Amino acid sequence: MSDVIVRVAARGDGVTADGRHAAFAAPGDTLTPDNVVIPGPHHQTPPCRHFPVCGGCQLQHLDDASYADFLTDRISGALAAQALTAPLRPPLLSPERTRRRAALHAEVKGGAVRLGFSEPASHAIVDVQECWILTPALLAVLAPLRKLLARALKGRARLHVTEVDQGIDLLIEGKLAEGLAIAEGITTFCGAHGIARLAVDDGIGPETRWEPEPVTITLGGVAVPFPTASFLQATREGEASLVAAVREAVGAVRVSADLFAGLGTLALSLPGKVYAAEAGRDAIFALKAGAAQAGRAVFAEHRDLFRRPLTSAECDRFEAIVLDPPRAGAREQVTQLAASKVPVVAYVSCNPSSFARDAEILCKGGYTLDWVQPVGQFRWSTHAELAARFSR
Ligand SMILES: C[S@@+](CC[C@H](N)C(=O)[O-])C[C@H]1O[C@@H](n2cnc3c(N)ncnc32)[C@H](O)[C@@H]1O
């Protein structure tokens, strides 16, 4: 007996109709009784030589149609578990080579450097020679960075790379050797390879070693100061998809709130007056400074929305509320929202399960889930993102 793979489970395995799992199997593949995967029409040849050893991608064996179905299934499955349904729009997928931020690992052993993503469920580092998800600029900096680290890095480090307005923001979490030659090596590397800022955190917080101009990221047309290794939507395309969905959801509001605002990706794209709340101190002060400099009507508050969510009465001051919480979701905040009179809620999520749990709270409170827009900005990974509109 052999069986056809009918779907891809949350962790990326292919699953047959009778529940057998197979790694690296696409819908339409056949799983033989001795568990051999015979590729079907949706099984593509993974483009990258490092797949599947590299932990950066899990789903390169899916063609775009199956990858889009995977995202849709993740969201509809999570909603179904809460007995909810919603019109799901076709997923918006970020193209290859558009990931503008990544957390990588590096290690020096016996004079040789390994630099890249770690292997799945392992500390081993895949020394990345090609990458189909990082932007060309981020990939290009890895070779000279490898050379710098061969001389400068002691042991192992975690690296955060982000494309910002001035070039590449690089945070090295690890120990670097001391001395004039190393300091000069850092300066030469930064000057030659488009580094906007290099900071080193050897355990006591980031120390900036290079930042010729103040580093910013432009969000909604405003140059916002960019604190080292801040949160940023993973691709420009993903950001544009989420911003467009949120703007459509809220319409021409005059007064709205952006909760879990970060640096203001959404707040700075909303019309009218915006109240923005965020628990990250550096992020909210950066948003405040950027908005003030640009003369934008954003009132930014440093606030922990898990411990101190906006009360229902506070929510009622707004024509629409946007929220974009971390993976845990926003149970405390949606409980207050569910008892409010806010006509429109736009919810951006990076976790279909916590989203569905929160959606159920909102729907029990009388909201209708109008639509969900899936967004695939972590191409070929098992992360599913979305924007959704609720109204009452
Ligand atoms: C997914 S990010 C979204 C940021 C922003 N909306 C954007 O698009 O760039 C979630 C944000 O929630 C913030 N956050 C996490 N826990 C929080 C809490 N308890 N209260 C308020 N903000 C919190 C994080 O610092 C982060 O900036």
Image (cartoon, rainbow, N blue to C red):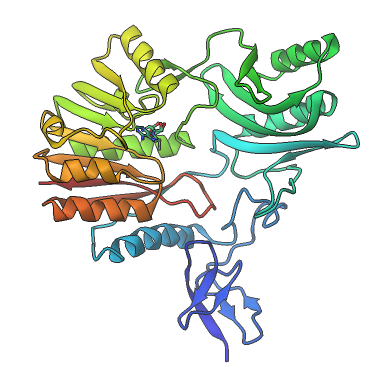
**Relative height, residue 82 to residue 281 (above, below):** below
Q: Nearer the viewer, residue 304 or 84?
A: 304
Residue ID at (22%, 29%): 257
Left or right: where does residue 260 sit relative to residue 173?
A: left
Quadrant for ligand 1 reads top left
Residue ID at (42%, 62%): 69
Q: Nearer the viewer, residue 157 or 74?
A: 157
The percent coordinates of residue 68 (x first, y second) are: 43, 57
The percent coordinates of residue 341 (x first, y second) are: 8, 39
**Relative height, residue 192 to residue 83 (above, below):** above
- Tell me the quarter of the image containing the N terminus: bottom right
Residue positioned most to the right: 110
Residue positioned most to the front: 307
**Which quadrant holds residue 210?**
top right
The percent coordinates of residue 356 (x first, y second) are: 30, 55
Residue ID at (47%, 31%): 231
**Relative height, residue 109 to residue 189 (above, below):** below
Q: Nearer the viewer, residue 32 or 312?
A: 312
The percent coordinates of residue 323 (x first, y second) are: 28, 37
Residue positioned most to the bottom: 1
Left or right: where does residue 5 sit relative to residue 392?
A: right
Whether residue 196 is visible to the viewer of this picture, yes or no, is no
**Relative height, residue 295 to residue 56 (above, below):** above
**Which quadrant holds residue 107?**
top right
**Which quadrant holds residue 299?**
top left
Residue ID at (17%, 54%): 363
Whether residue 139 is visible to the viewer of this picture, yes or no, is yes
